[in-house]
Amino acid sequence: MTQDRTTAKPKRKKWIILGIVGALLVAYGILSAPGLLLLLSGDRVDIGGRKMFISCQGTGTPTVILEHGLGSTGVDWELVQEAIQSDTRVCYSSRAGMGFSDPIQGEGIRTAQDAVDDLALLLVAADVSPPYVLVGHSFGGFVVRMFADQHPDGVVGMVLVDTSHADQFRLFEERISPETWAEVQQFFGTANPERMDLRASGAEMAAAGNLGDLPLVVIQADQQITDAQAQGVSQAVADEVDAVNNELAPVLQAELANLSTNGTLVFAEGSGHFVHVDRPEVVIEAIRSLLK
C-alpha cells in the first residue's frame, strides 16, 4: 500500500493553523481568497478552463520543479524550497483537486499521464521555462520520469525521493497475504484522494525509457511505516504492508538508480517515507549536487 497519506508531521501544524485562520478571515471579509493565496507566496494559474496552484521562489537557472506524492500537496516541499531559493529558482505546485488547485469535474479516473499533461500546461502558463531539475516524491516520481521521457530536451537533472517503481504494485500483490490484499487493493485501483489509477499509471511508467546519462540522485528512506489509523486499516494489516514494503524497497530503489549511467543511490538514515519533511537536508544536498 502506498504510504503517501501518512499522519501529518508536526512541522505541518503551522500550515493547518494558517489555513484555519485564513478561512476565517475570508469568511468575515477581512481577507479575499486571492489574498489567502498570497500568504502562501503563490498563484492560481489557468491551464485551460481550470486553475492550478504554483509557488515559485528565487531566481536563476536551471529551475527546480518539486512534484508531491499521492494525496499530498506542494506545501510538503516548503523546507526544501526555502533552502534552494538562495541557489536558483524553485517551484512547487499541487495537482488537480489538491491544495488550492481546482478539482477535475465529474467522476473520471486519472493516471500519471494526466498529471504529466497538467504539469506541462502549468509550466507554460506560469512562464516557468526550461531547463529543469525535476524532483519527485513517491507517486511524483512517476510524473517527473514520464515528463522527462516526453520532454527530454528541457530536463538537465532529476532527484527521486523514495519514489514509486513501475513494478511495485505487482510485486506487492504477489507478496501480500490474500486477506490483507482484499483490504487494501482498492487503493491501488482508484480509491485514493486523487482518483489516480495506480496500476494503469504503473503500466504507463513501464513504457517510458531509461534516463540515459541524465544526472540522477535516488534517495531511499530508512524505514517504511504505515499509520494504521490514518489509512483506515488494522494494525496487523499495517505491519504486513510495512514488512513487504521494507523488503522491496532496497531492490526497487537500486533499480531506479540504475535508470541512468550517471545515477547515485543515497540513504536517508532515520527518515520515514516523507524524506523531504523528516530529513530535508538530504534532499537539499542532492539537489545542490546536481546544480553544481
Image (cartoon, rainbow, N blue to C red):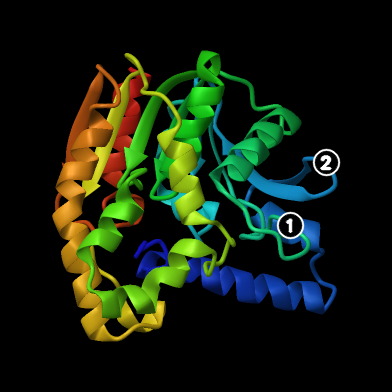
Q: Circle 1 is placed at which residue position?
A: 102
- Residue at (25, 84) in percent of width and height: 235
Depth check, front residue: 9 or 267: 267
Residue 264 x/y as whole percent: 21, 27
Label 1 near label 2: C-beta < 8 Å?
no
Q: CA distance from mark 2 to mark 1?
A: 11 Å
Check the image and report above or below for 226 versus 245: below
**Tag 1 or tag 2, which sits nearer the N-term?**
2
Check the image and report above or below for 25 versus 109: below
Q: Is 22 on the left or on the right of 183, as rendered?
A: right
Residue 209 x/y as whole percent: 41, 24
Q: Which mark is residue 166?
A: none
Q: Is residue 143 visible?
A: yes
> Disc 2 residue type?
Gly
Depth check, front residue: 26 or 145: 145
Residue 230's quadrant in the figure? bottom left
> Disc 1 residue type?
Asp
Q: Which mark is residue 48?
A: 2
Residue 204 x/y as whole percent: 49, 39
